[in-house]
Image: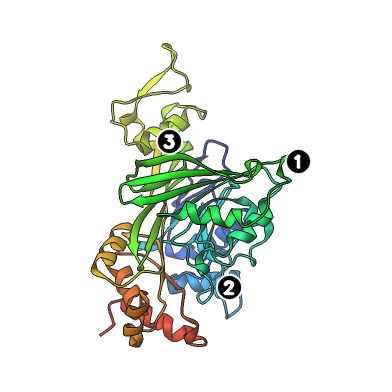
Amino acid sequence: MPAGADDDDVFDATGDRDVAINDVSVVAAVEPAAMEQFTVHLIAWAAKLVRCTIPKIYLDRGIREALTKINPVSKAAPFTSLAFFCNDVRKIHGRTSFAMRPLLHPSLVNGRYGDPTVYVETLFEKRDLLFDLGEITSLSPRKIQRVEQIFVSHAHIDHFIGFDHLLRLLVGREKTVYLYGPSRFAERVYHKLQSYRWNLVEGYRCDLVFVVVEVETPHSISTTRFQLKKAFAAEPVLSNGKFDGVLHHAPTYRVSATILEHRTPCLGFALQEAAHVNVWKNRLAERGLPVGPWLRPLKRAVVEGRSDDHLIHVDGSARSDARQVQLGELRDVVTVTAGQKIAYITDVADTAANRAAIVALAENADILFIEAAFAGADAALAKQRAHLTTVAAGEIAREASARRIEPFHFSPRYAGEEEHMLAEVMAAFRGLHA
């Protein structure tokens, strides 16, 4: 495996393997004869970095066998340990290629039948996300206290009941939490908060703040602030602000939303991780270029799509005597890997308008979490309740060109039939449904 990385994500490459690793991504190409040996090294390296899991993924047979030999797990949950690193496995020129993006780790909190909630852990950061806020008592207090962004599709009880548990854990801590929801969502948060008495909060040393952002229309948002030390009185911050589809933009990811119909406005979300830029140390050495802080502006310029004549100051400063190199001369010292895309869709009627909006939002998603409340045979009931069937979920994921589908929100009427429900979803996803 390559030598360890420094803070600038710079790596060596040796032998016939092309391997680039940084703290959030891995790209590797391995000759077939070396596949098992490489997998051994990869698992050993991954084990040192990651202690979390996500649901099983689908690997080709050879990789499955190698992983099973190295890391045997229970039959009930195969490949849930470190196999998630390999969420893109392809054959390229007779070699196996991995595209590994371990920065964002999503998981269904309550399984496929429980309240809809997806917890997204961000590796190497202490800022996690929730999609919907159903029952969350199964999450540890530590995990809940790490959450800073919560994206709520709508305020039906199974999507918002967890707010009280969140509130109870956070009162008395210095914390700001951003909540995003559909029209009139701030009003519902306000009534939740005002159902409790806050007459002693002036004695608290720490303050808790909720910033609630509503998607009012497809083109406008509003923001309201609720502060513990002000007894959670509603403080309007922004009204009729411009909305371009992006709800939150962070350095490492952005979250987009669209308004869907569930006989009430219901939001669908897409989480897009930023591209990963790896710098090759051996190629820097060939150019006589040093490792240093100047690599960060280089990577930023690549991600921002700067032109080839854009000047990079090699020593990281803007002094006139600094060595300057055009970006076009440096492109071959970096490797760019697209970031992971995760989409979350729940509680939507199966209409042409909803399908079109979901496909546009979730297009080319690496993972699509999508509700499949009813079996295909119960399409009439699904229409009556404004939910998707297993067949509709699979068809939508297929049309969106999602690479992996994670169906959830199964109705309890199908308890004990999870395998059948999954089979219906996958048949439609693969285009096999009649």
Question: Which of the numbered marks, if any, corresponds to residue 129?
Answer: none
Q: For the residue labelled by badge 1, is the local secondary structure a helix, a strand or a loop? A: helix
**Placement of the C terminus among the 4 image quadrants:** bottom left
Rendered location of residue 204, percent (x, y): 74, 42
Residue 400 in picture, x, y percent from top left: 29, 64
Name the residue tied to disc 3: 283
Cα separation between marks 2 and 1? 58 Å
Q: Is residue 233 above or below residue 169?
A: above
- Quick one: label 2 or label 1, which is nearer the N terminus? 2
Q: Residues within 10 Å of mark 3 (few under 14, many from 20)?
A: some
Give the amino acid type for the residue marked by disc 3 in the picture.
Arg
Q: How is the image coloured?
A: rainbow
Residue type for callout 1: Gly
Please tell me which residue lies in front, 401 or 231: 231
SS class, disc 2: helix
Mark 2 to mark 3: distance in Å? 36 Å
Report, in whole angstroms, how far the alpha carbon at label 1 lies from the one at label 3. Answer: 59 Å
Judge by depth and name the residue closer to the eye, 342 or 189: 189
Mark 2 sits on what residue?
A: 69
Q: Earlier in the sequence, mark 2 or mark 3?
A: 2
Residue 51 visible in this rendered orientation of the protein: no
Residue at x 42% of width, y 50% of height: 214
Residue to which mark 1 is pinned = 203
Which callout, 1 or 3, points at the residue further toward the start of the chain?
1
